[in-house]
Image (cartoon, rainbow, N blue to C red):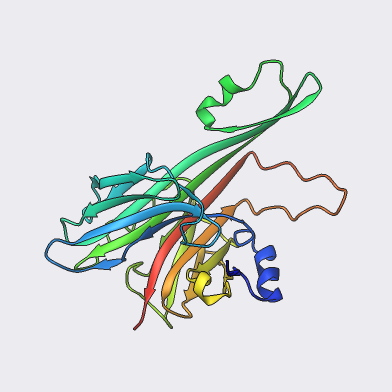
Amino acid sequence: MKHRPTVSTSLAILLALTLSSAAQAHRPWLLPSASEVDGKEPWVTVDAAVSENLFDVDGNALKLDGLTISGPDGQPVSGANVLQGKQRSSVELKLAQPGTYKFSLVTASAMASYTLNGETKRWRGHPDDLTQAIPAQAEALQVSRTHQRLETYVSANQSSTQVLKPAGSGLELLPLSHPTELLAGDASRFRVLLDGKPLANQQVAVVPGGVRHRGVLKDFAVTSDSQGEFSVKWPFAQHYWLQASYPPRAPAPAAGQPRPAPPAQRFVSVLTVEVTQP
């Protein structure tokens, strides 16, 4: 089988090691079949997975139990034909109203480590199961909770702005430019929010899809200003994966040194957008 590198240059490898998001071996994503859909009875399909090659179906499906879809009027709508496969899940939606829809998949998970009878134990699961899963005799208990938000937008026949409002909880990448009207060569504005408040000096990774055919990752990073805002100039047309993680990940320890304890809570926000030709 022909080897398909995800990163072809040492510079790209260095960037991947430097950017916390890009260093992740597997990325979770939502991917709409199109961000702008026209027609009398338009439909859209949204896939969800975790994969090593961004937007390629080479990993594991994400469960869509927690998926919410907001219609152009801000009210929840239900998807159809939900598929839970091995490598990807998907949902279809008839876009009955003209305007912009928001797809959000918000999940929570927990990791714990502890000692029991002198042995180190580890556990991973939903935070609601934590108390029951950890024995009462556990010692040196450390718990880290992760709150993850995946989002994307789709417009039917025309764009609208009702759904471009923050949820007000967790980490969010809020579009200030309309997320379904992005053009190659243009610069678009976003704001990073933590529990509804602007987050300054937050690094955001920007990774374009298509690396499987391009052979070069072409990722880069931007940083939010004092108002939590940042700008992305799109180098070419493609789907893009934007990701922020808070608090920042600690650098890897020197050889022989212990890893620092994970934070009690970590917030991750991922936004998929499509950039088209002008």
Which residue is rendered at x = 51% and y = 52% of the image? 59
Taking depth in this image into account, of 246 and 127 the one nearest to the observer is 127
Tell me which corner region of the image, top left, top right, bottom left or bottom right, holds residue 3.
Answer: bottom right
Residue 195 is at least partly visible in this image: no
Residue located 68% across and 69% down the image: 13
Side of 105 relative to 76 (left or right): right
120 relative to 221, above or below: above
Relative image position of residue 234 (x, y in whole percent): 46, 77
> Residue at the spot x=42%, y=73% of the render?
238
Q: Nearer the viewer, residue 127 or 199?
A: 127
Q: Quadrant of the C terminus?
A: bottom left
Q: Is residue 109 left or right of residue 73?
A: right
The location of residue 247, given as percent across then percent down, is 62, 51
Q: Relative to 130, is 182 on the left or the right? A: left
Q: Is residue 123 visible?
A: yes
| Quarter of the N terminus within the rendering | bottom right
Camera-nearest residue between 55 and 262: 55
Give whichever of 123, 106 is nearer the camera.
123
- Which picture quadrant has residue 216? bottom right
Q: Where is 229 relative to 130, above or below?
A: below
